[in-house]
Image (cartoon, helix red, strand yellow):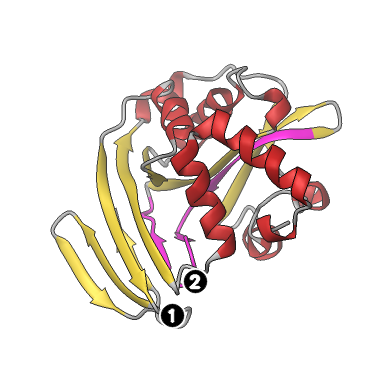
Amino acid sequence: MLWSELPMMKKVKSFLRMVREVGVIYTLQQVKWTLIPDWLIELNIWDASATDIRHLADLTTHDPNLRWATPSDVPRLAAFDIKPNVLTDALNKTVRIAVYEDGDRIVGYGQYAIDHWDQSDWLRFRIGDEEFLGAGLWVDPDFRGRGLGTRIMKFGWSEMVRCGRHRAVGIVNRLNRNMKQASANVVKIRYEPIFVLRFLGFTYYRYGNQRQLGRWTPRNRLTITF
């Protein structure tokens, strides 16, 4: 459900919870994303990374509540903020999802993309044969603070290494301190910024030595490799 569709009291409670978890500025940014389309105006900095994690192949013992999602999990996963095409077209083909269960509830998950990941309707990240992209991590608010995010990442990353994908790539919002901390608990990561400015669909981006200005669409996405 979008922020604009929430009842007032739920908006207030959700806002205060996000402030406690991620800080005021990142909370306001998330609210903005639900209220104002990014083609209208967007100013953002992502931190991109590409990290060799082949040493994680030695992690073979994991929490028994962790496993890879199967098509039978789609009805439950559909209740979360996961792109619909991931569950219908991409699950176990271009995206794998690690789930953490508490009884019959899914209380956490991590998404891992191979081949490519469509960050938005104008931006695609291309993924190499020996890479995977951490495309999202979520933990139920009632289970946060217990290290579930780190456990999910250790499971997903080590399993990917054993499948021959030893380079973890990805982006994280510069303000998303929780995701960065979860990643730091698994492996040391060096980040390089991706700067994006969009206005009325026209986009300027800077990543390393790459600088481009254009108007990209779902039929003509800007494609970035790590």
Region of the chain picked out in magenta, as a range: 106-129
Q: Is residue 166 above or below residue 6?
A: above
Mark 2 vs 1: CB contact within 8 A: yes
Main SS, magenta residues: strand
Q: Verify whether residue 218 appears in magenta.
A: no
Please name the amino acid that badge 1 sits on.
Thr
Going by the numbered disc 2, the residue's amino acid type is Asp
Label 1 sits on residue: 217
The one nearer the camera, 200 or 145, is 200
Residue placed at 72% from the left, 24% from the top?
A: 65
Asked whether 49 or 19 is in front, the reply is 19
Residue 215 horizontal/vertical position (percent): 34, 81
Task: Rate crowding at label 2 as few (under 14), some (14 to 19) or many (20 or more) other CA atoms within 10 Å.
Answer: some
Q: Position of residue 119 (x, y in %)?
A: 47, 60
Furthest residue toward right: 104
Residue 215 relative to residue 98: left or right: left
Q: CA distance from mark 2 to mark 1?
A: 6 Å
Label drawn at residue 121: 2
**Which residue is drawn at the image coordinates 70% and 47% (left, top)?**
11
Residue 183 disc label: none
